Structure formats: structure tokens, C-alpha cells
């Protein structure tokens, strides 16, 4: 299902081009529409299935997986708690079954940083005769070049300002990529800076507009349905690194040994440690996702945050172990392990970052 995506990954990483062909493959396999709710004609994939999809895509190409994750999360949330204007979402669904349709939130700002740390947006929505005019700059908008819909978090310019999400068509005049994504890892994810200059948004394309205050800020404890699939994505990267490590260990036959290094105690011990790290992390993530799907009330938001913290740590550590044992070959651009090592560094970057997660977990632990 994802073999074709894996074959294209190295070239997209090299060029940092938008992975349109890979996303087309994902669409044709039904992966971009998997979480569309049954009430909208979709399969209604839950958290566990989403996690397994992203694990598979992450193993093939995590840039493609991250772009897909944003679209899958948007549909999943709508399936559980409808909040889009009905006619607009019906249009999105219809087009999504016909071609790859991508959507993502645009929330991070140059001055604000990540909403996970609190604060309200500087991006402004000004009332017009036909709706709203949105202006502001957003950072790290994954998939920016190919998005059909930007979900822009903005503050109104009313006498009593409100905050809401303005659904902006990707083809609207006034949208400009103003900062190019040029990172160590996930180079093809297209997580560019985007500036909106007086972009027109009709009245019927606004979601969840409400007053200023804590309720308008991001609730880091409420995002388990996204935290766990994201963790699975990066565990997929680590599994890809592990696969190359195994291939190398069986193929490498030093002249002084006369047999593959896979037979040495040093390689077998490291292979065992990598497997323990990844298997334990996957169990935490997939078991937690399954509990969310069944509505298990004993599974807390703090447990989901903790599962992601440990999964990220384990994934990063597993790839580091493989690179360290291979030495120079592990860091050679001629080997995929070098790319996996770069990509896995992006795991702890996603909001809420580890310190925010640990703060929430610790607060609950001290005040049960």
C-alpha cells in the first residue's frame, strides 16, 4: 500500500519538493479519507486505525505522513463533534472522495509561538459586507503549498473581540508563502510560513467563534486523538531505521570476521535493545488508542500525554543506537538511515512539547 511512497521518499527529501505524487498514492489507497465519519459516507476510522495508518506512512515517508495526519485529524474531529458549517463540509467531503483534498490548521505565529503555551492570535479578522477579511502571518503550516483549506485562527477587530477559526480556501487571492521550510528533517512536509493579506472569507466559513479568555486557548489535555497517532508516525520512522539496521547487519561482512556482523554479540545486543524500545512504545500507543476508541473512562488525558512522551523518547533513542553502531555508514547520505535519523529529530518538536506534557502529568500526579 505504501511501497510506492517509500520509493519516492529519498528524492522528495533531497529536493524538499511538495510530495504530490506520494499524496496521490495515499489518496488512491483511501488513506486521506479514512477518518471521514460514517454519517458523511466515510469509513469512520478511529484513533487506533489512524495511528496504524500514520505508523505505516511514517515508515514510508514521514513528510507525507505528517501532511496526511493534519487532514485525518480534521475529519476525525468533525466525525466525533460536528462543528463545520454543514454545506461547506459536505463540499469538502464530496471533493475528498474524488481527489486528494488537504486541510490543516494555521495557528502558530511569529510572536505568539505555539498556542500550546497559551496566548491569543495577532492575526486579525475584519468584518466586511460579505463576511470577513483575514490578515496575519502563520508559521509552520504543514503542507502549505498543497492545502485546499487553511483553518486560520484569528481575533476579530470588533469592539469586544472574539476568537475563531476562519476557513480559507487555498486558492484565495492574498495568500503568500513568506518563509520557506528548510529544516533538518521532514524536508518535504512543506511546513512553510504563510501570510494572509486581506483574504476574503464568506460568512458561512467560520468555525467556533467566541469570546476571549482561557476557553479560547489550546487545551493540551484534550488532544489525545492526535497525540497518539503522531507518536505512531514517528515510531514508523524508527521502524524504518531498524529495518535498514538489520539489512546492514546481515550484508556487512568484514574481512577480519568472515561472517556478517549480525552474528556478533555487539550487534545482537543492540538489535535487542532497539526492539524492546520500539515494541514497548508501540504497545503504549496502540493500546491507548484502542482505549480511546472504546470510550474507556479509566484512560486519562495524562496517560495519553505520557505515552507520547515515552514513544518519542524511545523512537529517538532507537535510531540513535542504530546510527552509533554503524558509525560513518550510518551518517552517510548514501544510506536511508541518515534520513531517518534527521526525521526522527522532529518527533519531540510537536506541540505540546515534552515540558508542557510533563507539567500537566505532574500537576495531576500531585493533585489526584
Image (cartoon, grey):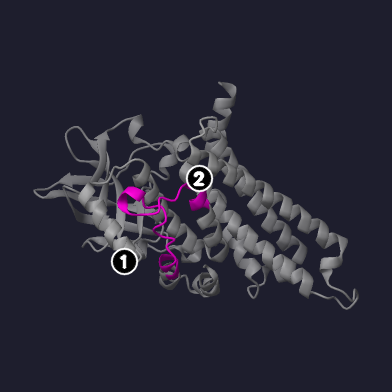
Residue 135 in view: yes
Q: Residue furthest bottom?
A: 255
Measured from the top left, where is residue 307 in percent x and y? 59, 41
Say if the magenta span includes residue 249: no
Say if the magenta span includes residue 34: yes
Measured from the top left, where is residue 73 in percent x and y? 41, 50
State whether residue 193 is above or below residue 39: below
Q: Secondary structure at mark 1?
A: helix
Query: 198 or 243, which is in the foreground?
Result: 243
Question: According to the image, label 1 marks what residue?
Answer: 98
Q: What residue range appears in magenta? A: 25-51
Query: 179 or 327, which is in the foreground?
Result: 327
Q: Residue at x 26, y 60 (%)?
A: 175
Question: According to the image, label 2 marks what residue?
Answer: 227
Task: Look at the numbered discs 1 and 2 and tell me whether their residues touch, using CB distance below 8 Å.
Answer: no
> Disc 1 or 2, which lies upstream in sequence?
1
The label number, if any, that marks residue 356 in the structure image = none
Q: Residue at x 55, y 66 (%)?
A: 60
Q: Residue at x 64, y 53 (%)?
A: 316
From the viewer's perspective, is 299 left or right of 112?
right
- Crowding near pointer 2: few (<14 within 10 Å), some, many (20+)? many
User: Which of the image's four quarters has the C terminus?
Assistant: top right
Amino acid at each position: 500500500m505504501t511501497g510506492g511512497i517509500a520509493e519516492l521518499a529519498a528524492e522528495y527529501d533531497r529536493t524538499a519538493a511538495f510530495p504530490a505524487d506520494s499524496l496521490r498514492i495515499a489518496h488512491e489507497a483511501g488513506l486521506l479519507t479514512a477518518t471521514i465519519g460514517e454519517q458523511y459516507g466515510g469509513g469512520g476510522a478511529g484513533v487506533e486505525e489512524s495511528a496504524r495508518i500514520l505508523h505505516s506512512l511514517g515508515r514510508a515517508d514521514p513528510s507525507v505522513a505528517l501532511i496526511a495526519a493534519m487532514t485525518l485529524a480534521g475529519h476525525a474531529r468533525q466525525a466525533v463533534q460536528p462543528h463545520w458549517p454543514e454545506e461547506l463540509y459536505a463540499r469538502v467531503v464530496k471533493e475528498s472522495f474524488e481527489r486528494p483534498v488537504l486541510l490543516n490548521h494555521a495557528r502558530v505565529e511569529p510572536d505568539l509561538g505555539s498556542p500550546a503555551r497559551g496566548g491569543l492570535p495577532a492575526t486579525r479578522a475584519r468584518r466586511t459586507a460579505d463576511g470577513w477579511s483575514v490578515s496575519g502571518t502563520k508559521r509552520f503550516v504543514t503542507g502549505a503549498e498543497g492545502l485546499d483549506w487553511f483553518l486560520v485562527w484569528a481575533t476579530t477587530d470588533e469592539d469586544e473581540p472574539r476568537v475563531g477559526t476562519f476557513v480559507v480556501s487555498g486558492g484565495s487571492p492574498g495568500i503568500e508563502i513568506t518563509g520557506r521550510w528548510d529544516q533538518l528533517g521532514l524536508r518535504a512536509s512543506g511546513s512553510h510560513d504563510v501570510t494572509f493579506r486581506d483574504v476574503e472569507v464568506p460568512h458561512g466559513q467560520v468555525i467556533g467563534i467566541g469570546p476571549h479568555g482561557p476557553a479560547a486557548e489550546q487545551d493540551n489535555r484534550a488532544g489525545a486523538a492526535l497525540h497518539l497517532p503522531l507518536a505512531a508516525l514517528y515510531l514508523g520512522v524508527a521502524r524504518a531505521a531498524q529495518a535498514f539496521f538489520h539489512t546492514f547487519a546481515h550484508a556487512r561482512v568484514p574481512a577480519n570476521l568472515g561472517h556478517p556482523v549480525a552474528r556478533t554479540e555487539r550487534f545482537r545486543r543492540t538489535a535487542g535493545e532497539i526492539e524492546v524500545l520500539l515494541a514497548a512504545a508501540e504497545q503504549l500507543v496502540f493500546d491507548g488508542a484502542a482505549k480511546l476508541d472504546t470510550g474507556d473512562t479509566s484512560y486519562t488525558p495524562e496517560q495519553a500525554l505520557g505515552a507520547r512522551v515515552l514513544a518519542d523518547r524511545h523512537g529517538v533513542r532507537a535510531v540513535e543506537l542504530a546510527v552509533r553502531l554503524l558509525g560513518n555508514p550510518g551518517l552517510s547520505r548514501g544510506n536511508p538511515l541518515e534520513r531517518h535519523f534527521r526525521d526522527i529529530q522532529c518527533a519531540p518538536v510537536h506541540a505540546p512539547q515534552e515540558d508542557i506534557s510533563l507539567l500537566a502529568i505532574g500537576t495531576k500526579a500531585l493533585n489526584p
